[in-house]
Image: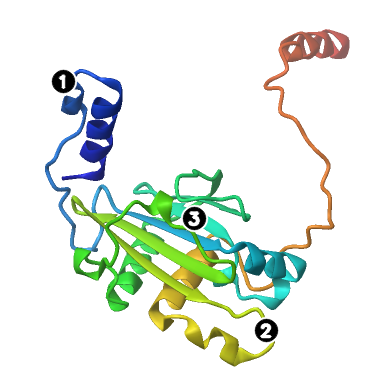
Amino acid sequence: MTPCIRRIITLILAGGLPIFALGGCSGTPSPVDSDGLAEDSCIDATVIVGTDLGRRIKNDPGAWPVQLRPARAIILPDGVLRADVGANLGVDDRPGETRSLYRTQLIELWKEMDMLDFGSPSAGNYSGNLGLLEPGDDEVIQILHFQRGGHDWTIVQRFEIPEDASPENASTFDVEEPRMRTAMRRMAALAWAWDVPPDDSIRFPERYDFGPDPWSRYRDEKSSKESS
């Protein structure tokens, strides 16, 4: 059963929607082409951290590798990448658009996921409700959700960074699963997120877009008359 069908069934059970609403989604698998892409290819990455660890990261974000900092990134089938960072992000949040990837970038990304053995449903290790995942005080939860060819699967890795562990000590991060670390860092890089975080002390002016100038044509006409 596709994710779309499951969501609609949930709405039907909860709100009594008419059963013909199911006609809006097709259960036919989307074929995977020779490049490894499908019309429904999607990758969803989320990092959630516990309260105490989140406080340590917030105090010195540059000391912590990017794959451990709270964040969320979604790569949609058309290549649009939505991403954001922050401790309040959850698995149901939909960040703003960050960039659009080229098809060649999507192909390369899926090839890398296949090389990590994450690119097929057999890689999934979690089938529960992601919204119910709660990290311990010093815990990191890394989540990758894939959709491809009519199938969807989820990989969840969780581990603790002890309170007395120093981020300056490389062995602190030995608890990470190497393949998951690679995948999460790849997603972060595509979202233009790096180990060195941006300087939040810089404040850019707020600029508003009020749309086209409705009086521009009259100004143009006045300019033409004056020049003549």
Where residue 223 appears, x then y in whole percent? 83, 14
Q: Would you identify the image quadrant in which residue 118 lies?
A: bottom left
Q: Which residue is mark 2?
A: 164
Task: State how far apart marks 2 and 1 are (Cα).
Answer: 57 Å
**Distance CA(mark 3)–CA(mark 2):** 30 Å
Give the residue at x 43% y 57%. Answer: 133
Q: Which residue is mark 1?
A: 20
Locate residue 95 relative to residue 208 in the image: left or right.
Answer: left
Residue at left 25%, top 20%? Answer: 16
Disc 3 to disc 2: CB gap under 8 Å: no
Label 1 Cα neighbours within 10 Å, binned few <14 / some 14-19 / many ≥20: few
Front tag of 3 and 1: 1
Real-space CA distance between mark 3 and mark 1, rounded to the nearest whole angstrom? 33 Å
Report the disc number at residue 221. none
Instruction: From the image, tell me which residue sits under label 3.
Output: 73
Q: Type of residue at label 3?
A: Ala
Which residue is at the far right? 226
Q: Is residue 34 left or right of residue 80?
A: left
Name the secondary structure under disc 3.
strand
Depicted 133 relative to depicted 124: above or below:
above
Which of marks 1 and 3 precedes in the sequence?
1
Label 3–label 1 contact, CB within 8 A: no
Where does the image place residue 130, in percent across and percent down from the top left?
Answer: 38, 53
The quadrant of the image that shows the C terminus is: top right
Q: Position of residue 31 (x, y in %)?
A: 15, 52
